[in-house]
Amino acid sequence: MSVSIVAARYAKSLIDLANEKNVLEAVYQDMLLFKDTADKNRGLMLALKSPIVRHEKKAGILKSLFEARVNPISYAIFLIISKKNRESILDEIAAEFIKAYNLSQGIQKATVVTTTPLTDELRKQFNDMVVSATGRKVQLAEKIDPNLIGGYVLTIDDRQVDASLRSRLNELKLQLVN
């Protein structure tokens, strides 16, 4: 069975449990914390994915990092996953949980890459574009890429609108070659 299917099943179970115990927001914050920690600390995921590191050691790592910082429900899930020897997919489970939470709350994540910081007016225009495309509330992440030359690249899930000058120049170059 693929990792994403297993991760989605664990995430769905965790959402159901968190809803049942009325701690959905707390567990969501815990999954954001775990995902952020895993993304910023390569060593953590290397240890959790390593077949050489014993499961007791992995459980100890999770305990020292998260027991005092997360909701008891979240920590209990970490322990269950550890006992089932699935620590290596904890980051995938957290990502799937975040996706499922956003879907259930009607939140759409989008990323816009520009050459300069967005003004409030431009931010509102991008928010409106995403709302009209998806019909959901928007969480807009802004990134700056000076190599873009001009324009923007808007990414919503697996869709991308590339209105940058670099892509237009590449299109012209291809047309001139043909």
Image (spheres, rainbow, N blue to C red):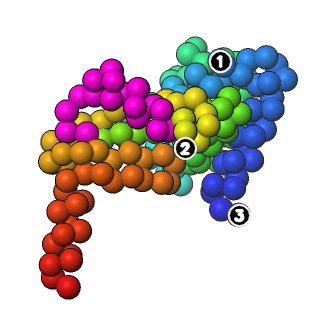
Specify the segment rendered in magenta: 114-130
> Which residue: 24% across, 45% down?
151
- Residue at the farthest right position: 20
| 126 falls in the magenta region | yes
Residue 41 or residue 134, whichever sits in front? 134
Tag in front: 3 or 2: 2
The tag earlier along the polypeptide, 1 or 3, is 3
Task: Give yes or no for contact between labels 2 and 1 (Cβ–Cβ under 8 Å).
Answer: no
Residue, disc 1:
26
Q: Secondary structure at mark 2?
A: helix
Task: Give yes or no for contact between labels 1 and 3 (Cβ–Cβ under 8 Å).
Answer: no
The tag earlier along the polypeptide, 2 or 1, is 1
Point out residue 91 in the picture as x, y percentages from the top left corner. Answer: 54, 42
Residue, disc 2:
133
The tag earlier along the polypeptide, 3 or 2, is 3
Tag in front: 1 or 3: 1
Q: Amino acid at mark 2?
A: Ala
Image disc number at residue 1: 3
Q: Is residue 40 left or right of residue 38?
A: left
Residue 30 or residue 48, whichever sits in front? 30
